[in-house]
Structures are given as structure tokens and as C-alpha cells.
Image (cartoon, rainbow, N blue to C red):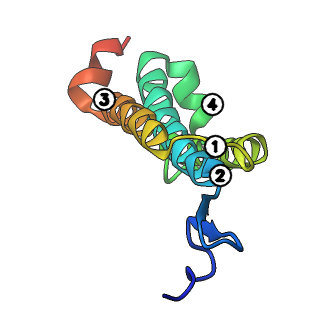
Amino acid sequence: MGSAPEGAAAEHRRDGHRRDRPEGAVSAAILAAGLGAAALGVLTTLAEASTSVKDWLAWSEPVGSLSGKTLLALAVWLVAWAVLHVALRKKAVETVWALVVCLVLIGVGVLGTFPLFFRLFEP
């Protein structure tokens, strides 16, 4: 049969056997997404726990502290993606492991943005 399409997860050797490509770059993207989500949840909770943090995160008057929270979470995601990509791109990292960690981090992010949770920390 034909060879794998370009960009597929495995390469074909000359003897016809498949050789798996490292999935570190994929895992890096997945983990970075989880870190960005967790950062948003932590920043939301911190903003509710401290008026000085909330005031500092208000980078745009009409938007309020949401402007700082989202821009910092975006920065965490981009920096994490770049650093993790460089660190993991040629490594054999289990994508399933990265997905599980990402889902836990997304859970932290959702919990941190859930009003019943972050209101526990209001001054």
C-alpha cells in the first residue's frame, strides 16, 4: 500500500516498517493550553482575594481586571508553549499523559473562575 501522508505520526523506513515520531511537540501544545487555563483561574481567584491585585490587573478602565487576567493568561500560554516546545520537541512524550495533565489544569482553571469558589476568598 501507499506510504503515510506527509506530517503523519509515523515514518516509514526503507524496509517498510513504521517508526514512530516523537510526540513531544504535540504534548507541549496540549500542556501549554492547560497551563493557560489554570493561570486564568488562579488570576481570577487572586483578583477576588485581594483588592490590590484586582486594581493592578485593571489595565483597561472599561474592562476592569478582566483585561489583566486574560492578557496574563495569554502570556502564560504562549511562553509555556514556546518553552515546552523547545524542551519536548524531540522527546518521546506520551500524548495521553499530557492530555490527562491538561484536563486537570483545565479543571483548576474552571474551578478558579467559578463564582461559588472565588467568592470564598473575597475580603
Residue 15: x %, y % from top left: 67, 71
Q: Residue at x 56, y 72 (%)?
A: 8
Q: Residue at x 49, y 17 (%)?
A: 50
Q: Earlier in the sequence, mark 3 or mark 4?
A: 4
The kind of residue on which mark 1 rests is Ala
Q: Nearer the viewer, mark 1 or mark 3?
A: 1
Quote the CA–CA distance across marks 1 and 3.
31 Å
Q: How many marks?
A: 4
- 8 left or right of 75 in image: left
Q: Nearer the viewer, mark 3 or mark 4?
A: 3
Quote the CA–CA distance across marks 3 and 2.
33 Å
Residue position marked by numbered label 1 in the rendering:
92
Q: For residue 121, which quarter of the picture?
A: top left
Q: For residue 13, which quarter of the picture?
A: bottom right
Query: Which of the numbered marks, if any, corresponds to residue 22?
Result: 2
Q: Quadrant of the C terminus?
A: top left
Residue position marked by numbered label 4 in the rendering:
56
Asked if disc 1 and disc 2 are in contact, CB closer than 8 Å, the reply is yes
The kind of residue on which mark 3 rests is Leu
| Residue 56, above or below 71 | above
- 97 left or right of 78 in image: left
The kind of residue on which mark 2 rests is Pro
Q: Earlier in the sequence, mark 2 or mark 4?
A: 2
Asked if disc 3 and disc 4 are in contact, CB closer than 8 Å, the reply is no
